Each structure stands twice: as structure tokens, then as C-alpha cells.
């Protein structure tokens, strides 16, 4: 008999690519839930809907991840990223289902001198309401649901665009270049840009195993957000007025990690770490994005 998979956030940036990967597989009954179908903050309704589908696996990509808005509205950040996730974990436990939950590199950052990638064994030290709310969500999953995959990733870009953020970093940069605006991007925050197609493919490979646990999954390599922007323009043959800036000068409302690169130690330990470089992924994204227009 096939597996029933419930995907929460099915029309989001990552969710859209998970749908594409799962729909190519046989023997899977995929239930795609959008925010309109189910609000994970309505805990009673969420339990009722999940129980009615009798899932073997629940994948939660839903989140409140606008980092500055989370800082202004920590209650909402905790409602969506922590308490709703606690409910999902308890429902999955009660149904004996696997819970796949997405988290972020922003669970790190407190170590200001850090220059080497964080492994899954290291203790989180978030700097923002968003990061704290995501850590709380992770801990609820790990303590309440016996069969879980918590997957941390970073700086996502996907063809569906990040609905919650109204685009993604690549699209924002291209838009600013088209408008011929001066572009200032921080050169003192380092991460690993990650294509949601690559992340989706790897999540699906991972859940085909029974190696439950915490995983870092990103494209390979690291860069500052400024380098990320520079690469996007080079690969698009654009030369806008791009200048590096500092975190202080940029002055965002929420604190962000200076360095939050993730080491894929657990993925490597089960022989699944073949993630391509972030530059190859950006190139592929831009080609696919051009072909869609
Ligand atoms: N984006 C990044 O750069 C990034 C980096 C690291 C980790 N992550 C994590 O990766 C995951 C996926 O991110 P993404 O970029 O794919 O996000 P996304 O495009 O915003 O997708 C999230 C989806 O969840 C839905 N959603 C939001 N609140 C919900 C709620 N209360 N109930 C039900 N559905 C809800 C959204 O619908 P509406 O838009 O209609 O509300 C959206 O379709 C998140 O867990 C995020 O924390 C993201």
C-alpha cells in the first residue's frame, strides 16, 4: 500500500518544489494544503484535518519568517513557529506519523567570532525573535514526536518566489537593477544560498530513509549577501550600482547572524551529501526563470 503525505504550505516557495518532486513518485497519495485550506494556528481544526487524512508523513513548510516583522510581533512568531508546531508534533505522535519540519540557520549567530560552519551537534544561540521562535519549534518537535526530521536550511530562493516575503532575494535584486536604483547589500553576514529545488529533492531522499533526526541541508559553499548579489548580476549580465554595506549602516530592525553557515555533517554520515555549489544553483535558477518568462 502507498504512503499518504500531507504537505503544509504547498504553494509556498519550498512547498511548490516538494510537490514537483513528490508528484513524480509512484505510490504516494499527496494531500496539498495551503494557508486557505488550514491555518496551523487553529490547533483544533488542524488536528481534525490531519486526523481525517490519516497521514504516514506530514511535511510542515509553513512559517512566519519575515525576520523584522517577527521582531515587531513576537507573539505571532511564537504562535506560528512554536505553538502551532508543538500541536503538529503532538498530532503526529498520536497518529504514529513522521513529522518533517523546516527550520533555519538563524537558530545560530550568538557566537560573534565564528568563522567555521555549524554542525547539528552545536547548541543554538539565536539573535532574533524569529530565531528563538524557530528553536522553540525545533525543541517541541524533538521532544514530542518520536519520528521526526528537523531540516535547517538557509537563504532560500525558488521559482515560486517566497510568497510570505513577496519574492526572494534573487528577484528583489533583479527588480532593483531593472529600476536602476542604487543597491546596498551587507558584506558582513555570511550564509549559504540554497535553491529550493535542490532542498526539495534532498528532503524527499531523506524521508525515504528511516534515519530520523536533525539535518542541515544547504547548497555547498558560503558567501556574504553582497557576494550573492554580485553573482546574481554577473550571471545575468547586469551591472547596476551595487555597493557593499555593513550591518550597522543597513540598520535592519532584527539582529541577524554575522555567520550562520551550516555544515551538513548528518547528511554526510548517511551518504546523502552531494549538494551542488550555491553558484551552480543560482545559474540553474536564472536559466529556468528566464525560460519561464
Ligand atoms: N525563505 C528563506 O530564506 C528561509 C531560510 C531558511 C529557512 N526557511 C524556512 O523554510 C520554510 C519554508 O520557507 P519558504 O521560503 O518556502 O516560505 P514561504 O514561501 O513563505 O512558504 C510558506 C507557506 O506557508 C504558508 N503559511 C504561513 N503561515 C501559515 C499558517 N499559519 N498556516 C498555514 N500555512 C501558513 C504560507 O502561506 P501564505 O503566504 O498564504 O501565508 C506559505 O504558502 C520555513 O519554515 C522557513 O522558516 C526559510
Image (cartoon, rainbow, N blue to C red):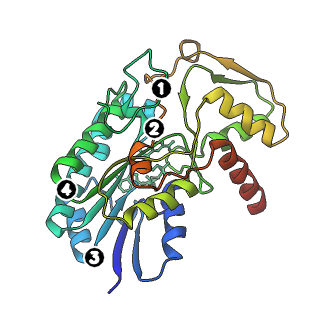
Question: In the shown orientation, is residue 147 left or right of residue 215?
Answer: left
Q: Quadrant of residue 192?
A: top right
The residue that label 4 is drawn on is 145
Which of the two discs, 1 and 4, labels the residue nearer the N terminus? Answer: 1
Q: CA distance from mark 1 to mark 2?
A: 9 Å
Q: Position of residue 46 (x, y in %)?
A: 25, 63
Residue at horizontal 42 percent and vertical 50 percent from the top: 267
Instruction: Determine whether, in the image, residue 82 is placed left or right of residue 72.
Output: left
**Residue corresponding to mark 1:** 116
* Residue ID for mark 3: 53
Please report the residue visible at 29 percent of the width from the left and 57 percent of the height from the top: 212
* Residue beneath the point at 69% across and 47% down: 280
Whether residue 73 is visible, yes or no, is no
Q: Residues within 10 Å of mark 3 (few under 14, many from 20)?
A: few
Q: Is residue 131 left or right of residue 85?
A: right
Q: Earlier in the sequence, mark 1 or mark 2?
A: 1
Disc with the residue nearer the chain's start (4 vs 3)? 3
Q: Secondary structure at mark 3?
A: helix
Does the residue tagged 2 have its C-beta within 8 Å of any atom of ligand 1? no
Real-space Cα separation, disc 4 to disc 2, in angstroms: 25 Å
**Front position among marks 1 and 3:** 1
Find out whether the residues at labels 1 and 2 contact each other: C-beta distance under 8 Å.
yes
Q: Earlier in the sequence, mark 1 or mark 3?
A: 3
Provide the residue designation for mark 2. Answer: 263
Amino acid at each position: 500500500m502507498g504512503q499518504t503525505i500531507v504537505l503544509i504550505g504547498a504553494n509556498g516557495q519550498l512547498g511548490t518544489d516538494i510537490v514537483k518532486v513528490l508528484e513524480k513518485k509512484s505510490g504516494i497519495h499527496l494531500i496539498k494544503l495551503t494557508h486557505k485550506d488550514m491555518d496551523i494556528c487553529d490547533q483544533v481544526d488542524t488536528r481534525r484535518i490531519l486526523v481525517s487524512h490519516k497521514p504516514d508523513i506530514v511535511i510542515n513548510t509553513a512559517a512566519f519568517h519575515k525576520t523584522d516583522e517577527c521582531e515587531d510581533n513576537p507573539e505571532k512568531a511564537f504562535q506560528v513557529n512554536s505553538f502551532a508546531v508543538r500541536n503538529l508534533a503532538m498530532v503526529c505522535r498520536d497518529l504514529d506519523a513522521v513529522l518533517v519540519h523546516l527550520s533555519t540557520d538563524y537558530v545560530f549567530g550568538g557566537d560573534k567570532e565564528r568563522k567555521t560552519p555549524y554542525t547539528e551537534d552545536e547548541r543554538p544561540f539565536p539573535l532574533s525573535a524569529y530565531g528563538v521562535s524557530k528553536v522553540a519549534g525545533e525543541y517541541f518537535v524533538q521532544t514530542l514526536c518520536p519520528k521526526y526530521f528537523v531540516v535547517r536550511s538557509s537563504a532560500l530562493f525558488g521559482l515560486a518566489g517566497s510568497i510570505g516575503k513577496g519574492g526572494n532575494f534573487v528577484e528583489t535584486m533583479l527588480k532593483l537593477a531593472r529600476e536602476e536604483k542604487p543597491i546596498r547589500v551587507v558584506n558582513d553576514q555570511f550564509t549559504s544560498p540554497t535553491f529550493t529545488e535542490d532542498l526539495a529533492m534532498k528532503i524527499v531522499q531523506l524521508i525515504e530513509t528511516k534515519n530520523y533526526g536533525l539535518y542541515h541541508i544547504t547548497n555547498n559553499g558560503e558567501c556574504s549577501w553582497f557576494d550573492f548579489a554580485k553573482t546574481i548580476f554577473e550571471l545575468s549580465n547586469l551591472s547596476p550600482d551595487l555597493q557593499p554595506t555593513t550591518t550597522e549602516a543597513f540598520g535592519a530592525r532584527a539582529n541577524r547572524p554575522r555567520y550562520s553557515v551550516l555544515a551538513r555533517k548528518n547528511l554526510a554520515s548517511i551518504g546523502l551529501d552531494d549538494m551542488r555549489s550555491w553558484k551552480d544553483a543560482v545559474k540553474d535558477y536564472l536559466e529556468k526563470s528566464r525560460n519561464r518568462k
